[in-house]
Image (cartoon, rainbow, N blue to C red):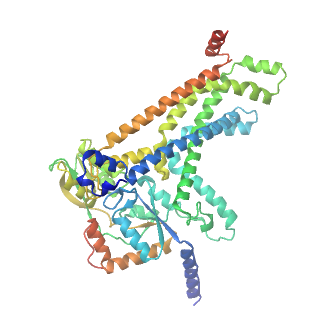
Amino acid sequence: MKRLILASAALAVSAGMAAAQDVVRLGTEGAYPPWNFINDAGEVDGFERELGDELCARAELECEWVTNDWDSIIPNLVSGNYDAIIAGMSITDERDEVIDFSQNYTPPDPSAYAAMSEDVDVEGGVIAAQTGTIQAGYIAEQGATLVEYATPDETIQAVKSGEADAVLADKSFLAPIVEDDPELVWAGPDVALGGGVGMGFRESDPELRATFDAVIEEMKCDGSLDALIEKWDVSSTHGEC
Amino acid sequence: MFPFCTDPDTLDTVRWFACYLTTGKHMSFYLSFGTVLLLLAITAPTALAFGFAGAAAARSRFLPLSLFGKGYIAIVRGVPDIAFFLFFVIALDQIFEWTRHQVLCPDWDQPIRQGNDFIVCQAAKLPLNTAPQWMHETYGFFLAVLTFALVFGAFAANVLFGAMRAVPRAQMETAEAYGMTRRQAFWRVLVPQMWIYAIPGLSNLWMVLIKATPLLFLLGVEDIVYWARELGSSKTPRFTDYPHGDWRMWYFLALLVFYLAFTRVSEIALERLTVRLSHGQATAQGEAQRRAGA
């Protein structure tokens, strides 16, 4: 009984804290279409912009978008410069040690190699990837030569300029580029990496995480999340909830 | 921007570019030039002040102060800039918030450090979570200025420390012979004469500082290089009305012109300053000026 009272008291306190925190700052990279990018008007746009705005509306939170360099996106979250990461970040064990993730809002999705020719040696060649991504970690483990770049765009340019034989990235990111660019083709088999993409929160911020978890669940169940995924073509859809 | 911009696909080249170069994104790019210039205008004098204080401290006869000055110069010069910007700024931010937390929320019972997380009460947040975005940006800018000033201040301190020692000993001896105290000799003889020895080193620092601004994006402040990279990267028609290939070369070319023009202006200004500071100095140039005048 005593424990129950304590628990409800803690809940009341945390509810009070959540109410005090009326503006939630969402951190993103702004360089990874279709997930998140800066549109012609100079604003954050993309799948995650729409998703984030919808989640905030459903959770009745006021949200503000912040762009941050990918390299320092986790340090700036844990030191409190924004409250959540929503930046196409795959859920991995390594990251989970430092921050907490919501449930995934897109299921685990294949990564793919794009190259200038189909018969590139993706296992022993020089492969480009963005620094600090699951793809970079994967290449390093595979024994291919890894070249890292700070932004996703530079990885593509590295392949086109011949610095790297192929680039490994989320298939949803590469797809519009490969479709559009006659020089680039898919190479090698797709690779399944990571545990899907989720929002990142401070480990000490379980209330905010729970809030977003609940609305993600809600969007999964009523099909609106799948509609967004299809609209932006970021992943295969969930189908169930 | 212009009324004819509604459907860019149908436009001829000139109009297309007129529309393209006036998108909201390009406006942010143009504004970032102002950000960079403002940053330099504030940072340079602040760094010089840090440098002067550091050099004066390093040559103090009071041992702890001298050790502090020398330690500042040695440590900050030794740490890579990127490490400084990634960790020091976050630490600085946390020091401010921790101090405010101690003052504003004395009866807070939870630990501030929880694992990796740094938690202070809402009232101690800097800026407050409810503050508008521009406050956050100004605060980030302020942190950037402070960090740049600390880093470049250490280099400037070393330059000034050397310059102070380069002032001919005879000048100081004369000051002593006139019965000036150490403090008077420092301010009236040493300081006015040291600048001419410091100018080459300081002008180097200024040139490096001009080009160091891309470090700003680590703090979330978007500078010209960030925007040039973002705007120049190839764009597929799905995500923009103005698709184009990899145009980074052209954007960086524009930056090159900007930087070259800026350094040229700086060179001219520094040249004039050197002439001015040489006036009446016991240096070759000062002597030449005296002869030409006589």
In this view, B66 is above or below B105: above
Answer with left or right where residue B32 lies relative to residue B120: left
Which residue appears at 27% of the width and 68% of the height?
A231
In this view, B35 is above or below A222: above
* Location of residue A5 by image quarter: bottom right
Answer with left or right where residue B116 lies relative to residue A112: right
Is residue A146 visible to us here? no
Q: Quarter holding the C terminus of chain B?
A: top right
Of residues B116 and A214, the one nearer the viewer is A214
Of residues A104 and B133, the one nearer the viewer is B133
In this view, B29 is above or below A15: above
Answer with left or right where residue B287 lies relative to residue B178: left
- Looking at this view, name the residue that lies furthest to the bottom: A1
Is residue A201 visible to us here? yes
Q: Estimate the x, y position of residue A44 in percent, counting from the top left.
A: 39, 60
Q: Estimate the x, y position of residue A107 in percent, counting from the top left.
A: 30, 69
Which residue appears at 46% of the width and 48% of the height?
B31
Which residue appears at 42% of the width and 44% of the height?
B225
Answer with left or right where residue B226 lies relative to residue A110: right
Q: Estimate the x, y position of residue A150 in percent, counting from the top left.
A: 37, 49
In this view, B194 is above or below B128: above
* Location of residue A232 by image quarter: bottom left
Q: How many marks?
A: 0
Q: Estimate the x, y position of residue A166 in percent, counting from the top left.
A: 23, 49
Of residues B91 and B24, the one nearer the viewer is B24
Q: Quarter holding the N terminus of chain B?
A: bottom left
- Looking at this view, name the residue that lies furthest to the front: B3
